[in-house]
Image: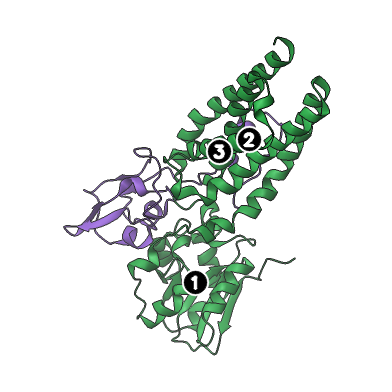
Chain colours: A purple, B green
Amino acid sequence: MNNFRYLENVVTLHLDESICIGCGRCLEVCPHQVFVPKDKKVTFSDRDACMECGACALNCPVKAITVDAGVGCASGMINEWLREHNIVIINFGECCS
Amino acid sequence: MEYIVPPGLYAIGYPESSDPVLVTANYKMSYDSVRQSLTGRNVWLLVLETYGINVWCAAGKGTFGTGELVRRVKSTGLADIVSHRRLLLPILGAPGVAAHEVARRCGFSVSYATIRAADLPEYLDNGLVTTPEMRQLTFTIYERLVLIPVEIIMALKVIGIVGVTLLLVIGLLGSMTAGILGLCAFIGACFFGIVLGPLLLPWLPGRSFAVKGAIVGTIWSWLFYLMAGGSGWNGAVSAALFIALPAVSSFYTLNFTGCSTYTSRSGVKREMHVGLPVMGIALVVSIMFLLAGRYLI
């Protein structure tokens, strides 16, 4: 993904290294190599590469990782917003349907 | 057409109790690509009920998830069929599956194998070891290209409604020729935003999809200006086009974040918070220019 970089300093990914037991699950599930092993635990190698899929947080057995996970789909989010505000104009289509 | 494979346990070749168990979604293309890559091998394939949705999307929705996996392991009686206790999952299924929960609830350990089905043979031959390449997500021009037709179809309805409105309003207030020109300009801007923005993604400057879209929209504005004889227009019309068309393209390229393999929800939210108001203002300013050009100049 060398040519693909998204916005810096926006992701909600957090890692509490004091809780980490170094099981390595997050290294296994992350498709963007956000983590790297360090002193029998993990640390961030590239936090801004995170796409907030939530795989690491869900698979962390000690809940050392938190992230506001979700699909970043603009039309889905617009629809969500329209629904929340009870505005029914037009459906912009959903992702992943 | 039928895109759904009945969920359950399938045998590829003639697997025995010691052979590996791979897990996939019941979207026919997922199932077929896994089966194809495993031709000539003896493995078990556990197909989860994801209602015909691919692994990644289903994992995001939670249907390719811990609950369904545990249920399917139990309902197929997998524990009696295989002698080992290991499930091999696609890496992109991980956003839906908590491996430690699966182990706790049904006794099977989860290994996340590869992202692509095509890497499975090497993974199996490699002694179930995932190489860095196997967990490296890509977004090649081909991978982007195959997504575009779906994007076009999804957008058609909105483009149709807006396009016809544009044609009628400009046709009635101005002339039919102007209406048709406006329609062409609009459709071109949609096309550039939906097709060219995503295709040129890594080469367009900036990180924001909205900005990348505005850039292809500006290119389209120039092309349209040159092709449609823009030098003969009054300044207000030209200004209106150069303001509105990039906004339209920008919206559609921003929408492609839903298909991309590297954008985060928080990033898209930030882009939308800034981008949508700017696009809205651009459209209003553009309409004001058009009206001014029609009635004042």
**Could you say which quadrant of the image residue B6 lies in?**
bottom right
**Could you say which quadrant of the image residue B194 lies in?**
top right
Residue B219 is marked as 3
Q: Residue furthest top?
A: B296
> How far separated are the C-alphas under marks 3 and 1?
38 Å
Residue B273: image location, x then y, percent: 49, 29
Residue B51: image location, x then y, percent: 64, 61
The amino acid pointed to by label 3 is Ile
- Please name the residue shown 23% across and 49% down the image: A17
Residue B193: image location, x then y, percent: 59, 42
On the same chain, marks 2 and 1? The answer is: yes
Residue B117 is marked as 1
| B262 left or right of B44 in image | left
Residue A48 visible in the picture:
yes
Foreground disc of the pair 2, 1: 2
| A20 left or right of A9 in image | left
| B272 left or right of B221 in image | left
The amino acid pointed to by label 1 is Ala
Q: Earlier in the sequence, mark 3 or mark 1?
A: 1
On the same chain, marks 3 and 1? The answer is: yes
> How far separated are the C-alphas under marks 2 and 1?
47 Å
> How far separated are the C-alphas under marks 3 and 2?
11 Å
Q: Secondary structure at mark 2?
A: helix
Q: Which residue is mark 2?
A: B226
